[in-house]
Amino acid sequence: MQNQRIDSIELLEISKISDPDGRGNLSVIEKGTLPYEVKRVYYLYDVPSDATRGGHAHLELQQCLIALSGSFDVLLDDGKNRTKVHLNKPNRGLIIPSGIWRELENFSSGAVCLALVSDVYKEEDYIRDYKDFVFYKTK
Ligand code: TYD
C-alpha cells in the first residue's frame, strides 16, 4: 500500500517456551500469529558483514523478518521518515508492511535472517530503485 508509514511497522514478541529441564527454548509461529497468511519462507545466511541485502520496497507483499541466529540491522524508510531496527533475538519478529523501503546490513558472523512472506515470489511486486520508490510514495 502506497500510504504506509514507518509507524505501521510492528515488532512482534514471539512466545518462548523455555524447557523446565534446561533443554533450551522453543518458539512458535502459527495461524493467527502474523496479520497475513504465510505463502513463502526464505532465509538469508552466509552474508558478509560488509554486504547490504534488500534495497527495495514491495507494492503488496508483507513480511516478517526474524534473526534466527546472530544479528543484523534493518533500515526502514517510508519516503519521508527513516528508522533502524536491530534484530538479535530469535523470538522477535519485525513485521514490514507493503510500501516500505528496507535495507539489511551489519550482519554478524553466522547470522540467519528468516523471512515469512505473504505471497509467492513476483518480481513485478518489487520497487528496486529508490528514486522510483520516493516518486511512488508522493503520487
Ligand atoms: P532479492 O529479493 O533481490 O534479495 P535481497 O533483497 O535479499 O538482496 O533476491 C535475490 C535473488 O533471488 C533475485 O535474483 C531473486 C531471487 N529470489 C527468488 O528467486 N525467490 C525469492 O523468494 C527471493 C526472495 C529471491
Image (cartoon, rainbow, N blue to C red):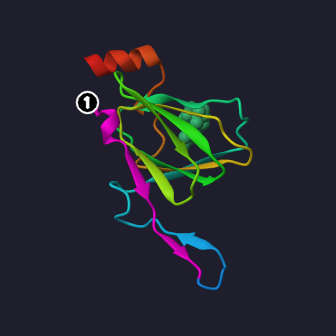
Q: Position of residue 25 (x, y in %)?
A: 59, 72
Residue drawn where x is 42% and y is 67% of the image:
30
Stretch of the chain drawn in magenta: 1-19
* Frontmost residue, 44 versus 70: 70
Label 1: which secondary element: loop
**Is 11 in the magenta?**
yes
Residue drawn where x is 67% and y is 79% of the image:
23
Residue drawn where x is 34% and y is 21% of the image:
80
- Which residue lies under the disc numbered 1? 3
Residue 9, above or below 123: below
> In the displayed image of the protein, which residue is found farthest to the bottom?
21
Residue 120, above or below 75: below
Number of residues whose C-alpha sits closer than 10 Å to that of mark 1, classed few (under 14), some (14–19) or many (20 or more): some
Query: Which amino acid is tagged 1?
Result: Asn
Query: Where, by quadrant of the figure, is residue 22 drawn?
Result: bottom right
Q: Position of residue 127 (x, y in %)?
A: 43, 25
Whether residue 109 sits left or right of residue 38 in the image: it is: right
Q: How many marks?
A: 1
Residue drawn where x is 59% and y is 50% of the image:
88
Q: Position of residue 73 (x, y in %)?
A: 56, 38
Residue 84, above or below 22: above
Q: Quadrant of the C terminus?
A: top left
**Is 9 in the magenta?**
yes
Q: Position of residue 11 (x, y in %)?
A: 41, 50
